[in-house]
Image: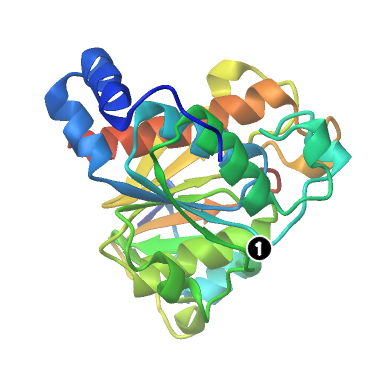
Amino acid sequence: MVELATSKAEFQRALEERHGAELQKKFSNSTVAVCGLGGLGSNIAVALARAGIGKLILIDFDRVEITNLNRQQYKAGQIGCYKTDALSENIAEIAPYITLEVHNVRLSEKNIEVYLKNTDVICEAFDDPECKAMLVNTVLENLPDKYLVAASGMAGLGSANAIRTRRVSGKFYLCGDGESDVTDGTGLISTRVMLCAAHQAHTALRIISGEFEA
Amino acid sequence: MVMVNGESLDVAGKTVAEYLKTANYDPRRVAVERNGKIVPKAKYSETVIEDGDNIEVVIFVGGG
């Protein structure tokens, strides 16, 4: 644990100064679950931690690889570490008073309800399209009271402006361009993945603030 | 007529499974909403699309 010269009250005051006390109270009292801690998830988590979200639930089973560093919020010295451990360390340096609940597991139809039942907003941040669909279908079927912010289509060097947020229905939002597949060629570029992650994190913050349009 | 992803299509009478197949969607990579409600995957082959329905097929591509 890093020794802190700055108190929890000082952090809270700084956030209130930036966001206003009323909005910050909503952020501080909220929980967001981030499912998958890769290019999307690690960037979503860092953005939400900086914004002063009270609690993050971080879920992944993978370890940091050298090929992740082009876009994910890890450091060279963390190669080989579990992403849950590495991201917890990094977030603790940024936002030391956030509450983190970490699960080093692979989410499936069978355990999604167990890990996601106590969150306000769920961010889908997987890379595999079948896993994305599995999570979205399971949440919409079994946890219909949760807000769900998913992503599809952020690979390549296409226009930044093609990344958008759409409210598909009710509590289900989808970010991305909807079509740029990682298998199409260029792969995942930090900026476009971060744009999509920012859309997801921003949508989560808007929902928490009480603003429900995309 | 049926609205599918904002486009008016003549697919009434087909099941969701049949529609996905004819439109070349991989059922493992989609979520389907019918009139704002999720169609459970287990019910794709028994859910018949009706005239006036609003269908959203959300397609997931790789990358994250």
Query: Residue A212, can we see it?
Result: no
Kindly state the secondary structure of the residue where label 1 is placed.
Answer: helix
Quarter of the image where one finds residue A103: bottom right
Q: Could you tell me which residue is drawn at 35 percent across and 39 percent down?
A: A204
The amino acid sitting under disc 1 is Glu
Residue A35 in the figure: left or right of residue B50: right
Can you give x and y, in whole percent of width and height, for residue B48 in the image? 40, 78
Report the number of numbered marks. 1
Residue in the foreground of this view, choosing between B46 and A157: A157
Q: Could you tell me which residue is drawn at 65 percent across and 25 percent down?
A: A192
**Residue position marked by numbered label 1 in the rendering:** A130
Can you give x and y, in whole percent of width and height, for residue A207 in the image? 26, 39
Can you give x and y, in whole percent of width and height, for residue B41 in the image? 50, 76
> In the rendered view, how is the structure colored?
rainbow
Determine crowd level at label 1: few under 14, some 14-19, many 20+ residues with C-alpha closer than 10 A.
Answer: some
Can you give x and y, in whole percent of width and height, for residue B11 in the image? 46, 64
Q: Could you tell me which residue is drawn at 12 percent across and 27 percent down?
A: A22
Quarter in which the N terminus of chain A is drawn: top right
Q: Could you tell me which residue is drawn at 33 percent across and 50 percent down?
A: A31
Residue A75 in the figure: left or right of residue A198: right
Q: Residue furthest left?
A: A22
Query: Residue A124, can we see it?
Result: yes
Q: Is residue B15 above or below residue A185?
A: below
Quarter in which the C terminus of chain A is drawn: top left
Q: Is residue B14 above or below residue A190?
A: below
Q: Chain of mark 1?
A: A
Residue A24 in the figure: left or right of residue A97: left
Residue A199 in the figure: left or right of residue A211: right
Residue in the foreground of this view, choosing between B46 and A74: A74
Residue in the foreground of this view, choosing between A207 and B12: A207
Residue in the foreground of this view, choosing between B41 and A25: A25
